[in-house]
Amino acid sequence: MTKVAIIGAGSLVFTKQFLNDMFNTPCMAGTTYMLMGPTMWKLEKMKQYADQLIDKNGIDAKIECTTDRREALKGADFVICTFLIGGNDAYKYDIEIPLKYGVDQCIGDSLGPGGVFRMLRTAPVIAELGREIDELCPNAYILNYVNPMGAVCTTFAKCTKAQVVGLCHGVQTTLDLISGYTNVPKDEIDYVNAGINHMDWFLKLEHKGRDLYPLLKENMEKPEYYKNEKVRGELMRHCGYFMTESSGHLSEYIPWFRSSREALDTYCDEPMFGGETGAALKFNTAIAEKFKNTDVFSIESGELEPRSKEYCSYIIEAIMTGVPFRFSGNISNRNGSIANLPLDATVEVPVYADKEGFHPYNVGRIPAHLAAMNMSNISVQGLASEAALTGDPELAFWACAMDPLTSTKLTLRDCRRMVAELFEAERKWLPQFEGKTLKAVEDVEIPEGTVGVPVPTDPALAINERFGKLAE
């Protein structure tokens, strides 16, 4: 009998889709699904929906609910993570406080001040969860959907011996777009992608041995195509490769598209995830308001929907049956899957799943300029993870200060002020920082008009002066 624990199962969209996918997977007959979250009424609503599917479609499955994480984990074969610590209440601060200081984020869930503080809130739960998994279900596989994906998976690698993989849908959805941009069926595109989550590069795009990049680049110069991909299209013009995440996401991870009003107006003026300010927060808030007083499951027919393209059910099926499944996964680089990125980083590469677990593809070295862009994000992720686990507010400050976007907008003094305000606003979700304070910025004027203190002559300058006279 298989047991699947879903941690954060109150998620309206994900849990509904995941259960529907699993009910479509024959090898999962007889499985018990443990729905765990902090709010029982949400879990019971999800159970009511699932039981309706089970009864109407004759599915062999059992649904249980609990607010006790240890109960959910005990004896689990698979642990699915999908939660947001602090919810929209905390997320609002992630977006609004940096914006007050001039740091304009579109999504703010993976990098930037928003991504850093989401990590600070999430890490204590990841650390506890990792220890509990090692104790209660040491042979379980962890499938993570929690953002910031790279930093969370890096933290999981430090906190558990279990096999962990992070899952995103950026590759699948971008392939849908590339299929449309090149008029080639998606399932006929031969590709290799490598990089990090939300900054993963299509190193190879072919159709029956023909390189698709010339056609993609040619079409991206047409206004009707470029309009959809202002950031990704512009970056591809310069770096030669298309990226796997939306333009809105990408605009936050590099310093060139949100650093000025002119840049924002040129590249980030499309609504929602094309780069609009606070797009994801607006979307989340609208969804929450829509369903606040609406029983969304009351309109469900009870019919089983077709299995989606989300990787999760296919990975579990591969582990259960031994039939390999290839997907794009976020996994530790400890075996050097990408040779020119750090071994302790989390990378996104092709991964095979089978009875033995996860087997990342060895990509080798990726082009140096792509690795450099990845490294700018990995550095922030590493600092955020370390800050979150140690409760060191100075490391949290440096994670924000080293962020590619923040560093184009703020001095170190203003960055420190912003981080201090974020700490104050989100204190109740940051228990590891209790009793610790960020070093204050002294509000003193920078001296002006003073005479420099005399210093000894620089030997190098003296030598240059001598050679200059000789040359004369």
Image (cartoon, rainbow, N blue to C red):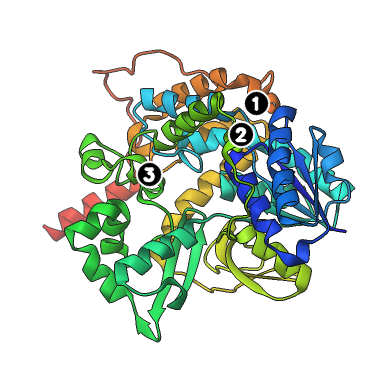
Q: Residue at x 55, y 45 (%)?
A: 381
Please, is residue 223 above or below residue 66 in the view? below
Dot 2 or dot 3: first in sequence order is: 2
- Say whether marks 2 and 3 touch (CB < 8 Å): no
27 relative to 8 in the view: left or right: right
Dot 1 or dot 2: first in sequence order is: 2
Residue 81 in view of the camera: yes
Image quadrant in which you'd find residue 448: top left
Secondary-structure class at tag 2: helix
Query: Which residue is denoted by mark 2 in the rendering?
Result: 120
Q: Position of residue 36 (x, y in %)?
A: 75, 38
Q: Position of residue 7 (x, y in %)?
A: 72, 42
Q: Residue at x 85, y 39 (%)?
A: 70
Query: Which residue is denoted by mark 1 in the rendering?
Result: 430
Q: Residue at x 31, y 17 (%)?
A: 447
Secondary-structure class at tag 3: helix
- Closer-to-camera residue (282/129): 282
What amino acid does circle 3 point to? Phe
Query: Which residue is denoted by mark 3 in the rendering?
Result: 273
